[in-house]
Image: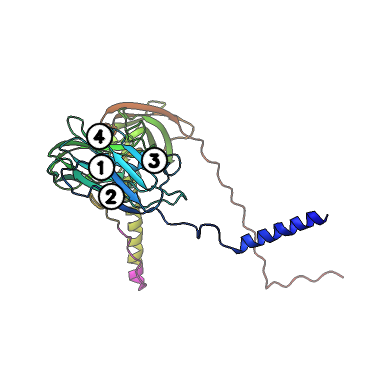
Amino acid sequence: MRRGLSAGVVLAVSLACASASPPPGGPEDREPPRLVALSPDSNAVNVRERNVTFRFDETINDRGSGSQELDRYFLVSPSDGNPRVSWHRSRIEVRPRNGFRANTAYTVTLLPGLTDLRGNSARAGASVVFSTGATIPPDRIDGVVFDWIAERPAARALIEAITPDSVRYLAQSDSVGRFTVGPLPPGSYLVRAIIDANSNRALDRAEAFDTARVVAPQAGGLELRTIARDTLPARISSVALSDSLSLRVTFDRYLDPDQPPPATAFRLVASDSTVIPVLAALSPRAEQAEVSARQQATVDSLRRVDSLAGKPLLPKLAVVERRSAGGSSPSAPPPYTTVLLRIARPLAPITTHRLRVSSARSLSKREEASERTFTTPRAPAPVRVPAPVPALDSTRVPAASPP
């Protein structure tokens, strides 16, 4: 018993001492790794070094963050495949897969996200531009890339500029979607922006992208609008009542916003072969403009009434202006899959109708006719309003009780 007691006392004293002193090695490191040196120097020419060397102020995690390899954090442009990356604790060496070519200008970029051994992630990147020849070409391609459906800049999108002989220059967009590819020799380039969801630096099926043909030197900024694309035509997938005089038509592919289907492209036929005229076909943006116009008309009418009554006027509705290329939203309206049809008369409940569109242009520029049969829903049951309860007369004197 005496031996067990003394051991417990020793353990308690050890725990007390451990809690009173700071953890071994000083305070916890919460600072991300910092780049302290980069070789070769930026804008250097006639470079003969075999690697680009990045030196940091602490040891770098050789697995990056999560399960990503270190080569995911480096871009070598022009590219001949995934770069070769060598880890030496606080020093990382990067070179093209097949080595640097002679008389070629390179851009080697360190992307944000590199971590130290404690998981602290670097928020900023770095890049170096140099040439293995005597000159560095002055041309570059600048632009901004958007997520077209979300109508916002696409951060960290992969940018490719590909020459006719398949030389591939790479870059990545920043947090506001802006990018610069280069330096580039003069010539024609196919520029492509990819929302690289799996970070494999290739365009995979279902990934959003956009392409444009650019001739360097470039005149003005380039705008790329990424969206998932295919080569199939758009067909009607469903038809539903929106209200008594409106049908909401949904397509299985995005429609081209530059050429929306007109009302004359739709034909609505009842089961008795009666044709119901279609008065208008509205895209989501046209529908929103119609709602805003009605709201503004209501506000204007109330303002007129208030002006006659001498009351303070209601404020006017704010008008949101769309910015052009280089702003915070795309310069073109986004594609859509739904169209609102205004029809001439209400449709009878529980009846079958057939809607046909003679031509609907998809985002791939293909046009094709399609049709869909649908049945209108049952009419809603009437709402029963209970009879009002007569109010009690508080001024009435109650009758006297019989003896």
Asked if residue 110 is positioned above or below residue 237 in the image, the reply reads below
Q: What stretch is highlighted in magenta?
A: 306-319
Residue denoted by label 1 = 224
Q: Where is residue 266 in the image (x, y as percent from the top left)?
A: 31, 32
**Residue marked by disc 4:** 99
Q: Residue furthest right?
A: 403
In the drawing, does residue 29 fall left or right of residue 124?
right
User: Mark number for residue 246?
Assistant: 3
Q: Earlier in the sequence, mark 4 or mark 1?
A: 4
Nearest to viewer (mark 3 / mark 4): 4
Q: Can residue 172 be seen in this view?
A: no
In space, the residues marked 3 and 4 are separated at their CA atoms by: 64 Å
The amino acid at mark 4 is Gly
In front: mark 2 or mark 1? 2
Marks 4 and 2, Cα distance to the nearest angstrom? Answer: 18 Å
- Disc number lying in front (3 or 1): 1
Q: How many marks on residues?
A: 4
Q: Nearer the viewer, residue 160 or 14?
A: 14
